[in-house]
Image (cartoon, grey):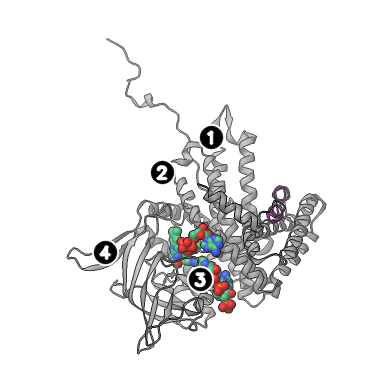
Amino acid sequence: THAFTHFPFSRSAIGTFFQEQPLLRNPFTQDALLRAYLRRHLPLQEVQSDLSEFGERVVCEIDDLGRQCEQNPPQLQPYDAWGRRVDRIITCDAWTRMKHISAQEGLVAAGYERRFGKWSRVYQMSKLYLYAPSAGLYTCPLAMTDGAAKVIESLGIPVREAFERLTTRDETKFWTSGQWMTERRGGSDVANGTETVAQRQEDGLYRLHGFKWFTSATDADITLTLARIADHHGNTIQGSVGVSLFCAEVWDSEGRTNGVEIQRLKDKLGTRQMPTAELLLDGMRAQLLSEEGRGVASIANMLTLTRIHNTVSAVAAMRRIIQLGREYATKRSVFGKLLKDHPLHVQTLSRLEVETRAAFLLMMELCQLLGRDETGTATERDTHLLRLLTPVAKLYTGKQAVSVVSEGLECFGGQGYIEDTGLPALLRDAQVLSIWEGTTNVLSLDVLRSISKSSGRVLQAFFSDVEERLRVAGPTLHPAVQSLSSSLSGLARFIQTAESHPPESLQLAARDLAYSIARIYMGALLVDHASWEGASHPDVYAALRWCEHDMCPVVSGEIRGCYSTNAALSDSQLVYQG
Ligand code: UCC
Ligand code: FAD
C-alpha cells in the first residue's frame, strides 16, 4: 500500500497559484488628466462630487449590467405561437436598467438643461466618458437620442412631446431615438442610396415605404429617418435635393410596430449588446421635420452630435484599457519582478497613455466648442473649428481606439484574449468606431468639404488657434513647439500648392490632410495643457513625446508623390495585379 500525503486528484494537484485579477476602480478618481482638466476649466465642487459618485456607481452597479448586456444579446421574435407577425425585439433586463440609469443620471438631459452654461457639454460628456466602457453599448442609443434632440431643437422644436421625452431625467417618460439613414445601396452615399418613398396623407402626415439596411438600437421609441417625397404621380426627385427628414414613433402603446417589419437582426463582430436590424418600412406613419429636400443638410446636426459621442466612446475605451492594464502590471509578476518594474512594459503603457491624452484633449476641446456654440458664446473662429474638428476627431480617435485597445489587450498576455475577462469585447466594440457615423475616408472628404464650403476660413481658424496656443509655451516645451511650428509651415505650403493641383489629387490627399490636422491640433492642445500653471511633469513629457510623431503626413506623402495622377494609376495596378 502507498501512503499518500496528497491525493492525485485533490485540489492541490492543480496547483496553488492563481493570478490576482485586475480590478476596475473608480474611473473618475483614477483619471489624473480628467481631474486636472476640470480643475483648470470647471473647478466646481458639485461637478467633482457628481462625477466621483457616478464613478462609484460605474464600478458597483453599471459595469456588471454592461457585462450582462454582452452575455444576453437581444433576440428577434418575428411571430407569436399562433403564427401572427409580432416583430418583437427581446432585450435583457440589464439593457432596460441602462435606460433608466441614463435618464436618472441625465446623460442626455445635462446637454439641454445647460446648468453649467457653456460648460454643460464638458460636464455631460465627462460623465458619458466614465460610463461608456461599462455601458454595454447603451451609449449608442444615447448618442442618437442626443443627436435627435439637437436636430429637433435646431428646427424650432416641431415635436415638443418627443423633445421633452428625449431630454427628461424622468425614467418613466424617457425616450430614445434611432437614426435610420443607411439603405442597401449606400450608407456613405446617402444622397444616391435613399430609395425610401414618402407619400403624403390627408392629415398632413406621411407614409414611408422603403428598406433600411442598418438600424441600431432598433428598440428605440422614435426615429429620425430619410425619404423622398413622391408627388401625386408617384415621382420623386433624385440626388440630395430629393431627400427629406422625417420623425416617427416606432411602436404603438401595445408594442406593435408602426408599419415596420423587422426582417432580421444582424450577426455582428461586436456591438452584440444592442440590436441592429434590417427593416422593411411598409407604410410607417411619419411627420416631416425638415423643409422638403433639405433632409441631408438637416440631419447634419445629428451627425455632429453622434460623431462627438463616437469620439467620447473611443477615448473612453482607450482610457479603460490603460486603467486596467496599469493595475494588472502591479499584480502580475514575470521573470522575477512585477510587470510595472519592467521598463519595456511600462514604456508600452506610456506610449498608449500619450495617445490617449492627446485624444482626450481633442475630445474635450470639441465639447467646449459645442457648449459655446449652443449658448451663444461662440466666436466665429469657434464655429469654424467646431465644423472642422468634428470629423477630424471622429476619424482620428476611431482609428486610435482600435490600435490602443489592441496593444492594451496584449498587456494582459493570453488573458487579454479570453472572453470571460471581459477584455475582448473592448476590442470588438472599438472596431465599429471607424465605420459607422462616416468611415475614415468619407470623413476625410467631409474635412475637405468643410474647408471648401468656408472658402478657407475654417483653415484660417485652425492656423490662428494653433499659433496662439504655441505662443504661450514655456522653454521646457521648446522641442515640441519647434516640431509643431515646422509641421504647421509644411501644412501651409502644402495647402498653397494644392490650390493649383487638380481637385481629384486633393481627394487623394484627404486622409493624410485630416491626419495632419489632427496630429498638429492634438500637439497644440498638449502643449497648451502643459503650459498651464497647474501642469505636472507628465503633462510636459506627454507633449514632448507626442511631437516626436510624423506630425504632418500630408507633406511626407507629397514628397513621395503619393497624390499625383501617376500614383493613382500605380495604386490601381498594384491592387489589381493578377
Ligand atoms: O451609422 C449610424 C449610426 C450608428 C450608431 C450611432 C452611434 C454613435 C456613437 C456611439 C458610440 C458608442 S447612422 C448613419 C451615419 N451615416 C453617415 O454618417 C453618413 C456618411 N456620409 C456622409 O457623411 C456624407 O458626407 C453625407 C451623406 C452627409 C453628405 O454627402 P453628399 O450627398 O455628397 O453631400 P453634399 O451634397 O455635399 O451635402 C448636402 C448638404 C450640404 O448643405 P447645403 O445644401 O446647405 O450646401 C452640406 O453642406 O449637407 C451639408 N453637410 C453638412 N453640414 C454635409 N455634411 C455635413 C456636415 N458634416 N456638417 C454640416
Ligand atoms: P460604403 O459606403 O459602401 O463604403 C465602403 C468603403 O468605401 C468604405 O471603406 C468607405 O470608406 C469607402 N468609400 C465610400 N465612399 C468613398 C469615397 N467617396 N472615397 C473614398 N472611399 C470611399 N446606419 C444607420 O443609418 N443607422 C444605424 O443605426 C446604423 N447602425 C450601424 C451599426 C453597425 C454595427 C454598423 C457596422 C453600421 C451601422 N450603420 C447604421 C451603417 C453605417 O453607417 C454604414 O455602414 C457606413 O456609413 C458605411 O456605409 P456602407 O456600409 O454603405 O459602406
Determine which residue is flagged by label 3. 147
Spatial separation of the CA atoms under disc 1 and disc 3: 43 Å
Disc 1 residue type? Arg
Disc 4, SS: strand
Q: Which label lies toward us, 3 or 4?
A: 4
Determine which residue is flagged by label 2. 420
| Residues under numbered marks 2 and 1 in contact, where contact means CB atoms less than 8 Å apart | no
Give the residue at the far bottom of this rendering: 202
Quadrant housing residue 569: bottom right
Return the residue nearer the eye: 450 or 133.
450
Disc 2 residue type? Asp
Q: Which label lies toward us, 1 or 4?
A: 4
Spatial separation of the CA atoms under disc 1 and disc 4: 48 Å
Q: Which residue is at 63% across, 35% downward?
A: 344
Q: Which label lies toward us, 3 or 2?
A: 3
Disc 3 residue type? Gly
Vertical comparison of 295 with 405: above or below = below
Q: Which mark is residue 332?
A: 1
Q: Point out residue 567 in the picture as x, y percentages from the top left corner.
A: 64, 54
Q: Which residues are magenta?
A: 540-555
Tell me if residue 541 is in the magenta stretch: yes
Earlier-in-chain disc, 3 versus 4:
4
Quadrant housing residue 308: bottom right
